[in-house]
């Protein structure tokens, strides 16, 4: 199976799977234009705005497997930064009261 990601404004908007028969069992990068041409024949996908790029499920090319919301720099897909987790009560430490000694 081949996997393609729709990129619009540098962000992955859709990811689909295409049967190997539709790309003539070609390896990447020869498979990419064949897959893009196949996608263009599918009305529901052809109307989506953006550019289709092949992505590797096994991370063999283009950095990482594209997911919704991932970035694309024109060469590689980029996983979004992990958001900072919300603090929990365990994240706070309790400072002991200072001991003041008489002179």
Image (cartoon, grey):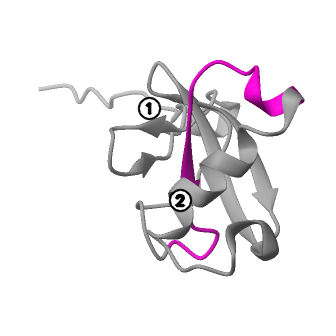
Q: Secondary structure at mark 1?
A: loop
- Badge 2: how crowded within 10 Å, few (<14), some, or many (20+)? many
Tell me the quadrant of the picture where the C terminus can be found. Answer: top left
Q: Secondary structure at mark 2?
A: helix
What's the distance in space between the residues labelled 2 and 1, CA to CA? 59 Å
- Badge 1: how crowded within 10 Å, few (<14), some, or many (20+)? few
Q: Position of residue 11 (x, y in %)?
A: 52, 28
Q: Is residue 23 above or below residue 60?
A: above
Query: Going 61% across and 48% down the picture, which residue do you hit?
Result: 36
Numbered circle sitting on residue 32? 2
Q: Position of residue 43 (x, y in %)?
A: 86, 29
- Where on the picture, by quarter, is residue 54? bottom right
Q: Nearer the viewer, residue 93 or 32?
A: 32
The boundaries of the magenta stretch are 44-59
Q: Is residue 45 above or below residue 57?
A: above
Q: Position of residue 82 (x, y in %)?
A: 53, 39
Q: Nearer the viewer, residue 97 or 19?
A: 19
Judge from the rendering whether residue 61 lies leftward or rightward of residue 53; answer left or right: left
Q: Position of residue 20 (x, y in %)?
A: 76, 75
The answer to which of marks 2 and 1 sits earlier in the sequence is 2
Query: Going 64% across and 18% down the picture, which residue do you hit?
Result: 49
Magenta stretch holds residue 58:
yes
Look at discs 2 and 1 and give the one toward the viewer. 2
Q: Is residue 65 above or below residue 59?
A: above
Residue located beneath label 1 in the image: 95
Tell me the quadrant of the picture where the N terminus can be found. Answer: bottom right
Query: Going 78% across and 49% down the picture, which residue do you hit?
Result: 16
* Number of on-image labels: 2
């Amino acid at each position: 199976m081949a996997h393609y990601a729709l990129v619009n404004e540098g962000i992955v908007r859709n990811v689909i799977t295409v049967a190997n028969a539709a790309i003539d069992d070609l390896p990447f990068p020869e498979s990419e234009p064949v897959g893009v041409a196949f996608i263009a024949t599918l009305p529901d996908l052809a109307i989506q705005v953006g550019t289709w790029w092949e992505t590797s499920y096994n991370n063999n090319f283009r950095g990482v497997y594209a997911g919704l919301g991932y970035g694309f720099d024109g060469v590689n897909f980029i996983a979004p930064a992990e958001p900072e987790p919300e603090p929990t009560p365990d994240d706070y430490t309790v400072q002991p009261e200072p001991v003041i000694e008489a002179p």
